[in-house]
Image: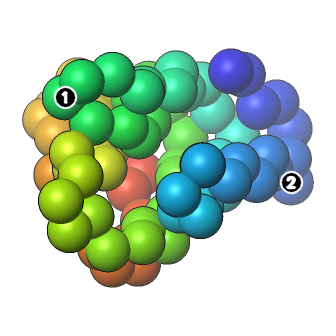
Amino acid sequence: LTIAGADAALGLRFADGSEATLTAGTARLRDDAGGMGVVLDTGRVTCVVRPRTGRPPFVVGSRFGEAVVVGTRFSVSVD
C-alpha cells in the first residue's frame, strides 16, 4: 500500500477487530502462520491491537526490526 500526501491516511480493520491507521508512507500487510500485522517501509502506523490470547502475535516490522505485540495501543514511525 502507498499512502500519498502529507494529510493522507488509511484505516484498516483486521478480522479480530484490531486496527491500524497508516499515514503518508509505504507498507505491506502481513497475515500468515507467524502472525498478522504491517511491514512499514516509510511513514507512520498507529495500532490498536486486541488481546492475542491463544493466537499468533500482531507484528509491526520495518528495516530496523520488529515490534511483536500481544494487545495494546502504539505507534511506529519510519523515515
Which residue is tagged 1?
Answer: 34
**Horizontal and vertical percent position of residue 36:** 37, 37
- Seen from the viewer's position, the closer of residues 78 and 28 is 28
**Horizontal and vertical percent position of residue 16:** 53, 57
* Residue 20 appears in view: no
- Residue kind at label 1, given as amino acid type: Gly
- Seen from the viewer's position, the closer of residues 44 and 37 is 37
- Residue kind at label 2, given as amino acid type: Asp
Q: Are marks 1 and 2 in contact (CB under 8 Å)?
A: no
Which residue is tagged 2?
Answer: 7
* Residue 7 appears in view: yes
**Circle nearer the N terminus (1, 2):** 2
Give the side of residue 55 with respect to residue 1, left or right: left
Q: CA distance from mark 1 to mark 2?
A: 32 Å
In the picture, the quarter occupied by the C terminus is: top left
Outermost residue, bottom direction? 72
Give the side of residue 37 with respect to residue 69, left or right: right
